[in-house]
Image (cartoon, rainbow, N blue to C red):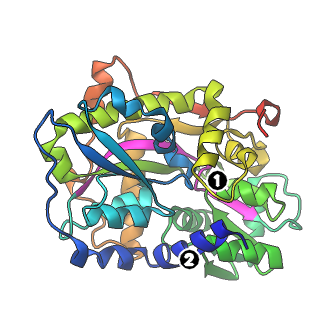
Amino acid sequence: MNWFDRCIGLALAVLVATFGLTVGNVSSAFAGENSYGKVGDPIHLVIGYQPYYTESWSGVVMQPMKFYEKYLPKGSTVEFSIGLQGAVIVNAMLAGKQDIGYMGDMPAIVSTTKQNVADLRIVATAGLGHDQCNIFLARTDAPKFANQTEAIKWLNGKRVAVPKGSCTDRFAQAVFKKMGIEPASYLNQNIEVITSGFRAGKIDAAVIWEPTASRLVLEGLAKRVASGTAVNENDGGFIVMRNDLIQQRPDVVKAWLNAELDAQQYLADPKNAQKIARMVKDQTTGFTEKVLWTSLYGEYPEAQGGTAVRLQLPYTISPEASALITKAAAFLYSVKSINTPTLRPDAVMPEFTEAILKERGLKSPIGVVKALPASAYKGE
């Protein structure tokens, strides 16, 4: 077992399976409001981001490209902190140790419900997709399915694993409900255990996010059989900020979100695909450059849930992103991860990104990441 498997396995075992409890226990670490200085002053920002979650890779791009230097007040500094899971970033933000976070839809939503600890707000969409978190993998000796529907029906009566409380859990349960599937067992397992389960033949299928899904496929441990395209279920990544930063430094909020727009446009340009895969490899452990390239840019057959657009970049909180937040919040309430079925009105703040789009003469989505054939990969 390599270092990455051990680390991410331990993190996910604690954080994914008991996400609501983990976040709920942070209040003792909260130190009150942060002081961010006056408008125009230099600022030091700590950014929590997830190179191990493909849908938030605009944060990965931001680190080496430093788009923020063009917009932040002169003399400002930025520190990037890797989170193996969104819950790690949420906890750090609640404790006042991080100011801006890149994370999946589930932790982003949970973060806004902890006002008794700290006030966090969703301010932008990092990306939306149908096959970034929503990916069904099956054991390698599973039948060759003609299409996704056939593959999903095969799951009836099988052993299916998923990190419960995550975006994959919401997706799996939605699919089972829509298609009347009843697995023999629905196991709460982290990525380490799922990987071992495929290796040992102890599970029949799992739902996993990118880039881990492509890693398991390319390493020959599992095969991809379906995605969110089968039932029109999407997933998303979002950007969360502390509200004291928003209130004290609207200039910094605007500056960072202008840089984020640049990062998303860079992400969408196919000419940058190889460079981005290399950037991610430099910021992760346990992944090859080819796996990372495949996880965001690789083309999969339609019968396996492949789609022409791997990632949509709405940038702002588009109607589609808003609908996803509403649906995911209802799911989190149903599994008792949050105490309200709907978020408070000010939990989501699209006004900054909407104003920036207007100023720059752009409309949402500002770009898409299109699937590329395997022959387009020119890396190591």
Who comes first in sequence, dot 2 or dot 1? 2
To which residue does mark 1 refer?
211
Q: What's the residue at 46%, 74% (across, down)?
A: 15
Percent from the top left, x then y, of residue 282? 61, 47
Look at the image and say whether residue 75 sits in the magenta stretch: no
Q: Nearer the viewer, residue 54 or 290?
A: 290
Q: Amino acid at mark 1?
A: Pro
Residue 317 on image: x %, y %: 35, 41
* The label number, if any, that marks residue 10 in the structure image: 2
Query: Is 119 displayed left or right of 19 in the figure?
Result: left
Please determine whether, in this image, residue 32 is positioned above or below residue 255.
Answer: below
| Label 2 crowd (10 A; few <14 / some 14-19 / many >=20) | some
Residue 104 point in image, percent of width and height: 46, 55
Secondary structure of the residue carrying tag 1 is: loop
Image: magenta residue range: 120-137
Q: Is residue 96 visible?
A: yes
Work out how far the residue at label 2 is from the one at label 1, CA to CA, in angstroms. Answer: 18 Å
Closer to the camera, 228 or 242? 242
The C terminus - image quarter = top right
Above or below residue 195? Residue 348 is: above
